[in-house]
Image: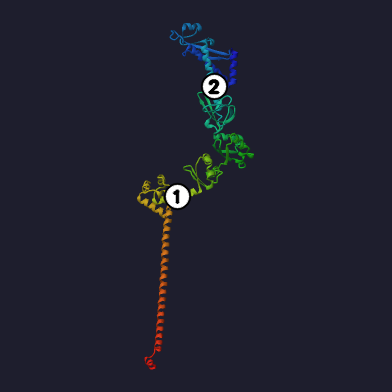
């Protein structure tokens, strides 16, 4: 029995990786548990493993008394002297117990204690083994799937790949080989829980460290990673050696290095950009391939206002906003993107609003807090609405409206332009009618002049006619005088 027990302890220690002393301590606890199970909790028991015998020595201790009150823990002085003649009152006397005499129930209890203790010891060993391996890549095979995610067999233990740590649209079957990032090790009642991830940004960093020797050697440093798992990622790199191109080192000859990483991530597109301590340069690189016109930095609120050409807006934002989201995550700043035309309008509105603020002598924040962010909004508001702005009164509202009209801060609407156009057309029609009236009057005047001239000509012609008639009459008169027969002469011929 002794040889078999020693052999069993050595074999379990080798197979399970449990230290021999830990196994012996576990067995001692098991034997103690079985004795207390049989004799009671108040029994004073000492259990030790005897390597020479290959078994356990079990002793029950009793206190020597002159009168017994508790037979389990006490013994009379007279009885004690049979075992040890030199014993005294209040001494403790040990009595050896036979393990074989404990019975089946005690043996079952000892077995349960041994199993439980060995399980705890194994769990402790696993926890100690994996707790310092965080941010490492572990490999295993898909074992099964439960409500939490995929269970991966790592050999001595199992790991959990939760749903939120998986790459979207990634599918597995039982027995598939898989590798993932050791993300966390938790102590739980059932034992250590090992959590792995395939979507964590650090997984991409560890893959670069494995595939790119310059990264592993420290010549190229990864300064930041932003991922949309399974779709796209941005990696910022810098070189500690000016003779090493960080982007070229990560890409490899004909893209060999980056392709290995892309295949592991199921085709995830990876943009490698150069890191810069200058936030504007870093932002320009992060938003590539879009071209940037201008960047305004608001360090207080952590906002970058990025202006791009009108034809670059879609490229800067990316599909479903992916490009700007990854850039913002990589930079750690909020990014607002504007087109050049939109930014020009906003700048003009802001400038005009600042002019109105100077006229009203009211802080700009008061206008913005009330919801007025442009001169147009101020012009279209009623006086009652403007009076809700802190610091404004009726006189200042009047000054603001005068300033809007004087400075021309508000563009005239199409309706106003159409009304002005109609007024202009009406005025033009009036002028045209006036011109036509004037022309008509001139024509009438010319007609009147011509009529007067004709009348004058007619009068002159009449006068000439009358003069002609007069002369003719005179001539006729003269002829008649000469031709008329003289009465006397006539009478003389007769």
Q: Position of residue 111 (x, y in %)?
A: 53, 15
Q: Position of residue 249 (x, y in %)?
A: 62, 39
Question: Which structural element holds mark 2?
Answer: helix
Q: Position of residue 30 (x, y in %)?
A: 52, 16
Q: Nearer the viewer, residue 99 or 322?
A: 322
In the image, what residue occupies the spot 38% across and 94% down? 492
- Residue named by callout 2: 121
Q: Position of residue 7 (x, y in %)?
A: 60, 16
| Position of the C terminus by quadrant | bottom left
Question: Which structural element holds mark 1?
Answer: helix
The colour scheme used to paint the residues is rainbow
**Callout 2 crowding tier (Cα within 10 Å): few <14, some 14–19, many ≥20:** some
| Position of the N terminus by quadrant | top right
Point out the residue furthest to the left here: 394
Regarding residue 410, the answer to whether it shows in the image is no
Regarding residue 402, the answer to whether it shows in the image is yes
Point out the residue furthest to the front here: 494
Mark before the other along the chain sequence, 1 or 2: 2
Q: Are marks 1 and 2 in contact (CB under 8 Å)?
A: no
Say which of marks 1 and 2 sits in front.
Answer: 1
> What numbered label is drawn on residue 284?
none
Q: Nearer the viewer, residue 456 or 265?
A: 456
Reply above or below: 144 against 424. above
Alpha carbons under labels 1 and 2: distance apart? 72 Å
> What numbered label is drawn on residue 349?
1
Reply above or below: 135 against 409. above
**Left or right of residue 262: residue 340:** left
**Callout 1 crowding tier (Cα within 10 Å): few <14, some 14–19, many ≥20:** some
**Left or right of residue 363: residue 20:** right
Reply above or below: 222 against 481. above
């Amino acid at each position: 029995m002794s040889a078999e027990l020693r052999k069993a302890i050595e074999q379990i220690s080798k197979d399970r990786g449990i230290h021999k002393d830990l196994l012996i301590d576990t067995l001692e606890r098991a034997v103690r548990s079985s004795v207390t199970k049989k004799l009671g909790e108040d029994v004073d028991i000492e259990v030790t493993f005897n390597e020479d015998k290959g078994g356990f020595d079990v002793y029950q201790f009793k206190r020597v008394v002159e009168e017994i009150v508790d037979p389990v823990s006490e013994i009379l002085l007279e009885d004690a002297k049979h075992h040890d003649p030199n014993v005294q009152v209040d001494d403790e006397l040990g009595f050896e117990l036979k393990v074989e005499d404990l019975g089946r129930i005690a043996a079952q209890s000892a077995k349960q204690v041994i199993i439980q203790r060995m399980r705890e010891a194994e769990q402790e060993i696993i926890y100690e083994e994996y707790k310092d391996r965080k941010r490492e890549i572990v490999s295993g095979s898909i074992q099964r799937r439960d409500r939490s995610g995929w269970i991966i067999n790592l050999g001595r233990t199992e790991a959990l790949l939760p749903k939120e740590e998986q790459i979207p649209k990634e599918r597995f079957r039982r027995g598939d080989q898989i590798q993932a990032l050791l993300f966390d090790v938790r102590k739980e009642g059932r034992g250590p829980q090992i959590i792995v991830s395939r979507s964590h940004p650090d997984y991409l960093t560890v893959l670069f460290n494995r595939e790119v020797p310059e990264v592993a050697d420290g010549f190229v440093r990864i300064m930041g990673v932003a991922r949309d798992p399974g779709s796209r990622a941005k990696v910022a790199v810098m070189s500690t050696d000016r003779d090493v191109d960080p982007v070229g080192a990560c890409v490899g000859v004909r893209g060999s290095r980056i392709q290995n990483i892309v295949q592991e991530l199921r085709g995830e597109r990876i943009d490698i950009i150069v890191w810069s301590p200058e936030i504007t340069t870093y932002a320009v690189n992060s938003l590539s391939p879009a071209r940037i016109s201008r960047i305004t930095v608001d360090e207080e609120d952590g906002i970058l206002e990025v202006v791009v050409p009108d034809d670059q807006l879609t490229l800067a934002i990316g599909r479903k906003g992916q490009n700007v989201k990854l850039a913002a995550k990589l930079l750690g700043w909020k990014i607002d993107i504007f087109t050049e035309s939109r930014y020009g309008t906003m700048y003009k509105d802001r400038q005009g609003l600042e002019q109105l603020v100077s006229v009203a002598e009211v802080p700009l924040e008061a206008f913005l807090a009330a919801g007025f962010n442009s001169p147009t909004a101020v012009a279209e508001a009623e006086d009652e609405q403007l009076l809700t702005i802190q610091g404004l009164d009726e006189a200042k509202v009047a000054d603001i409206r005068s300033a809007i009209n004087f400075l021309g801060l508000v563009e005239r609407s199409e309706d106003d332009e159409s009304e002005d156009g109609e007024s202009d057309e009406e005025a033009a029609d009036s002028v045209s009618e006036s011109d036509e009236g004037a022309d008509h009057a001139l024509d009438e005047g010319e007609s009147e002049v011509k009529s007067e001239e004709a009348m004058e000509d007619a009068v002159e012609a009449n006068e000439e006619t009358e003069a002609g008639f007069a002369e003719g009459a005179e001539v006729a008169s003269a002829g008649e005088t000469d031709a008329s027969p003289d009465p006397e002469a006539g009478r003389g011929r007769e």
